[in-house]
Image (tube, rainbow, N blue to C red):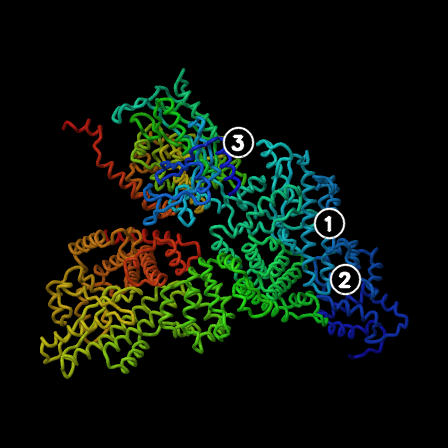
Amino acid sequence: MPDGAGGGRVSRAPSLRARLARTGFADASRAADLWESGFLAGVLAACEAAELDGGSTDGGLGAASTALIADVARAADPDLALLALARLGEADPERAERLTQVLADPAGARRNLIAVLGASVATGDWLVAHPGDVELVLRPRNGVAADPANVRTQLLESVGADPDAAMPVASVRASDGALDEMRRAYRRALLTIATEDLTATDPEAFLPEVGAALANLAAAALEAALALARAELSDHGAGVRLAVLGMGKTGGRELNYISDVDVIYVAEPADGLSDAAEASALRTGTKLAATLARMCSMPSREPALWEVDAALRPEGKNGPLVRTLASHVSYYERWAKTWEFQALLKARHVAGDADLSAEYLAATRPMVWEAAGRENFVEDSQAMRRRVEDNVPPAEADRQIKLGRGGLRDVEFTVQLLQLVHGRTDPSIRSANTLRALQSLSAGGYVGRDHAAELGACYRFLRVLEHRVQLYRMRRTHLLPTGDDDLRRLARSMGRSPEGEVAGATDLVARWQATRRRVRRLHEELYYRPLLPATARLSADDVSLNPEAAKARLQAIGYRDPAGALRHIKILTEGISRRAAIQRQLLPVMLGWFAEGPDPDGGLLAFRKLSEELGGTHWYLKMLRDSGAAAERLATLLSSSKYVADSLMRTPEAVAWLGDDRELTPRTPEALAAAMNAMLLRRDDATDAAQAVRFLRRRELTRGAIGDVLADVPVTTCAEVISPAADMALAGAVRIATQTATAELGRGGDPSAFLVVAMGRLGGAEIGYASDADVLFVHDPHEGADPKQAQDWAVLVATTIASLLGKTGPEPVLPVDSQLRPEGRQGPVVRTIDSYAEYYERWAQGWERQALLRARSVAGDAELGERFTALIDPLRYPADGIDLAEIRELRRIKARVESERLPRGVPATHHLKLGRGGLSDVEWTAQYLQLCHAGQTEALRTTSTLGALAAARDANLISESDAEQLTAAWELATRLRNAIVLSTGRVSGQKVDVLPSERGELAGVSRLLGYHAGHARDLEEDWLRTARQARVVMERVFFG
Amino acid sequence: MDRQQEYVLRAIEERDVRFIRLWFTDVLGVLKSVAIAPAELEGAFSEGIGFDGSSIEGLARVSESDLVAKPDPSTFQVLPWRGGKHGTARMFCDILTPDGEPAAADPRNVLKRALAKAADAGFTFYTHPEIEFYLFQPQENETDPLVPIDNAGYFDHVARGQGHDFRRAAITLLESMGISVEFSHHEAGPGQNEIDLRYADALSTADNIMTFRSVVKEVSIEQGFVASFMPKPMAGQPGSGMHTHLSLFEGDTNVFHAPGSKYGLSTTARQFMAGLLVHSGEITAVANQFVNSYKRLWGGQEAPSYKTWGHNNRSALLRVPMYKPNKGQSARIEYRGMDSAANPYLALAVLLRAGLKGIEEGYELPEEAEDVVWELSDGERRALGIEPLPGSLEQAVETMERSELVADTLGENVFNFFLANKRQEWTDYRAQVTPYELARVGLI
């Protein structure tokens, strides 16, 4: 420090500034100015005068002054506290002296004032405007500990109402000053609560008292507002009994400093039960309720308190504001949704007619505790959970204290769900207060003790955080601020550690994030862990539910056979094996994930089987334990897709892919070909080799299926996974079959070149999990080969291919179908390319041109493939399109197919392939456009349906919207067909092509496609609409 | 067991009710009824009554025919005309699937969905129907000509008229069933009567219309006549329309009312009307669902055949009735297209959604028609841009088929069924040979 010699102010200044900067003032020079002038200078002088020795010590300041500065520096925001002190001292000269005394007295209550002013700019403003209230801060009385009745009396008396009257009425009208009186009384009470809160040694432990005091205060304010509202009416609304019930945090006695106060109103005529009396009571009651809300929120000289929110009432914002008791009851009996009962759990009398409130509670409480038995409880509560998580604007997601995953709402949801599930049979856990409910759940043995304690701690931390954020400006907010200064102030206002240290901004954010993560985990621990049998407890604090409670809990989240589920859980977790030990860790969270899928029971059973299969391997459980993503994926797969569950059972090593995203991306055709080559090189026996090819295909299908289930069944899987797998299988089969045939017919080499041409949807790379492979076989005898022998060889190759891929065996079949060949079943299985040329030249019919549009050479001799393509291109892309006769014939065939091929008993609207607006409608339309225009428009020369539609749109052959509707129907039908296979595990039979009508099946399929639970019917509507629209386009474009 | 249900059970015991009729409506608006004994009722409340939906027009989804009728206890009423010591009572039912979801094809559910859509936008929909019907002498056999019970005209007072007794008896019954009647009078046709129900929310209105039809039928049988809601029972005489007054409320405020604007109509009202006009063609098949309906629409006698609106213009499809300036709450518009044979649930649903569409999209209301539309020449109408409603059931079906609005309102299943059913009706009708044809060309 430069110099400390002089005692004068000028020379002391730099040193004071430095000291202030050191002790934590952000703007030290402004702070020094404040200390050195006006009121605060006087305070310092008073400090020094009080010190008898008068000797200057450090930096020219006396010990007393130093202590005062240190005290101010301990405020959450020292600069803020200092400025507020200065303003306060100058606001009211009459009190300046008293204030100076207080501040100069180290043993006095100055710390209260500093703590409050340093944490809340709003309180500072209030005190400057109402200097008399400083006394409340210095000697808070009856703040947190106040009896609710006292608070009520205080507020009622502030408006001149008699607290003992049955219907208290304000003796002064609101406009004559009573409203402002009431608000001042409210603020004063709020100030005492805030003071006690901010000066508490352990604010988190103190939180429950603060929340209760705030709720009591809000209730008292509502009572006073009602008294004011009655005073507005000429007869004081004497004809109506009005009860105000507090909901939400008000009801649970866990209110925060400022938020909407949720209420419900009940009105009854004071005497007489005639209809007229009731109607008039409702009218008056509505008036009272509306006025009451205005008293709390309308602008006046003193600031508004908060909004009174009655949106939780029956029918929400559209319902009448006030109802009679009977009307409430009949609503809850008939219309109320699960969440409304969950909300009712918190209802409590807060103002107005206490007897009426009691009647209301007596009538509605039983319904709350029956809610878990309602039909749609599971879906409703899942939807509620989603609301908890989804309703956060993305920009706020990282700052929300209340909403979002791991927020306050999440804690409340967990507790309330457990209450609804077990409160049916156990009245001891029905408290409306979150922390008390949590305690009683723990005491009742429904949740583990340490987990409950931990969740309670998380809740208290989050709530104190929220309180501190709100206290700063007394604004309704639940967002963590982002500025460093704000965070620093917040951290310092959270109280001190037992060692007396305050947290910094970084510590606070870290703790907050850790708490949110912890809340998520704790939900699983609380809800699912107690489902494990007693023998599977991880610690002495864990609990194990009795079977009835466990069943209720499983049922409430969607397990249809809870008894069976409990058996699986027991088997999975009991014993001393390493496997059981890991599964005890894993299972609670997996039980929750299974429940999120459409078939939790199936998922759990499949998991049990898989674990029995793989539990002994070194990697399986380790991966699930170490990679949360893999375990969650596995649970999703097992509970939503029988196809994948079966595949994983057969290819257990595929479970390993779940831990590695690269394993789940589709293999390129080249990689597939390489894998196949490698496998074939190692095998001599044809059957054996064919099984290897089929195994490879199955592996790819499994990969595709896993990807599908995890990503709402994208349409691209057909082109990227399923079709390439079939191409690969055909290529492998050609290789094996030519070798076999050549060996069998005893020649030195192949007598002919062989080609497989993919047709139909395989040609378009559009096949699904349950499709056949439509093909043509072509060969071309080498020069000098005997035509007869070459043909025999080719027939043998073709039939061998079909049998290698189609004969039943351990690996799944790929039926090979060559019906689209010339002359159909009557024609030879395979022809030479010359024979094709001759046939097409002489006989080619319209439908054959159409079929050839999809031809794509896929396996065998590539050069032959090119020649074949060159042969058919002029046929399928006629230069001048097709003539009217051919168009007419095409339309006639399509019309006949429609009436003939649709299976009996299947409604045309529900058949995905042949029905109205189904695949075939779209494909014929695309092919019609191709036949007419591909000669001119090169882009139309594609085997892909969607490609052809896009090209037709680009060439203005169809409108943008037509193309869009056709594409939408085709994509949805394709995804549906895949989802049906994935969901049911069925790969053959008629049902694969029909939208399920059985609700359970439809639900499973809809979930795979990304619909929320309970929205299966939306899928049906979507399909029917999309297909209907596509059909309209098809009729216009195709039938002309 | 909730209180309402308990109340019903107690009432049944106290009033010695021996039969309980469970009512619901098929897609065409025909009332269906299944009677159960009081002992079954408790089960019906908790489980519903299962029935085979495939035998009811349009109700079941394909290949899932099991349905459940679950009585709505708030609609419990003793049927007064059954009288006697052992009474009969009725309740309307909601139709559910076996797993407790509302059945998509239940017309009550179609209307509820439309009302929910309105509620999402903050609206409640109020309606007030004026139901016209004829009273005839009973026929000996089906081919006999229809003989009306009197020859009076609009508002005529008929001395010692049987119609008075009839209306008095019907209104007494309706009031005793909790259905308020606004007023009643003799209509323009011989034997034609009109009874106006008091305004109510749309779901109650639809329930009330169904009850109304039964009451009128019962009373007419009692008094020895036949009541008919057929849209056009006699050529050359006025048809039976069901003019319906519509209004939207936001809480307690009528949002059609805007003091000071022309006719006191708010922008919302004008957009709602524009919606009705723009989509009136698409919804005609629902509001006028029978071959016969088009004989009313196009048979003159003041039926609205063109898509126009007017203030006190009786030729307009939409009329803005006069109301006293200080009675803003009664601001409303009157849709005059619907006939008495419509399925009220579906018809009110499509009217509401057409109007809402106008509000959503902010349609502009075209100019008011001040002329009597049917006195204009075709050329004049064309010049004024006045379009006709569909001329026949066939045209109406074709127009409806292209309507996304109607598909969305009815749901795809009901939409499909309705179209198929109406196409069939047209095909059957076309195969008929009528007396008119015989008289005109029979001797060529």
Whether the residues at callouts 1 and 3 have beta carbons within 8 Å, the answer is no
Viewer-side label of 3, 2? 2
Give the SS element for disc 2: helix
Amino acid at dot 2: Asn
Please state which of residues B93 and A111 is positioned toward the viewer in this rendering.
B93
The residue carrying mark 1 is A151
Residue A862 in view: no
* Callout 1: SS: helix
Residue A112 has which mark? 2
How far apart in space, not on screen, are marks 1 and 3 (Cα)? 49 Å
| Gap in angstroms between the C-alphas marked 2 and 1 | 22 Å
Contact between labelled residues 1 and 2, with CB atoms less than 8 Å apart? no
The residue sitting at the right extreme is A52
Is there a contact, CB below 8 Å, between mark 3 and mark 2? no
On whether disc 3 and disc 2 are found on a single subunit, the reply is no
Label 1 environment density (alpha carbons within 10 Å; few <14, some 14–19, many ≥20): many
Give the residue drawn at x 25%, y 36%: B429
Residue in the picture at 15% in, 27% down? B443
Coordinates of residue A39 in the picture (x, y in percent): 81, 62
Front of the two marks 1 and 3:
1
**To which chain does the residue with label 2 belong?**
A
Q: Amino acid under label 3?
A: Pro
Amino acid residing under circle 1: Val
Q: CA distance from mark 3 to mark 2?
A: 63 Å
Secondary structure type for disc 3: loop
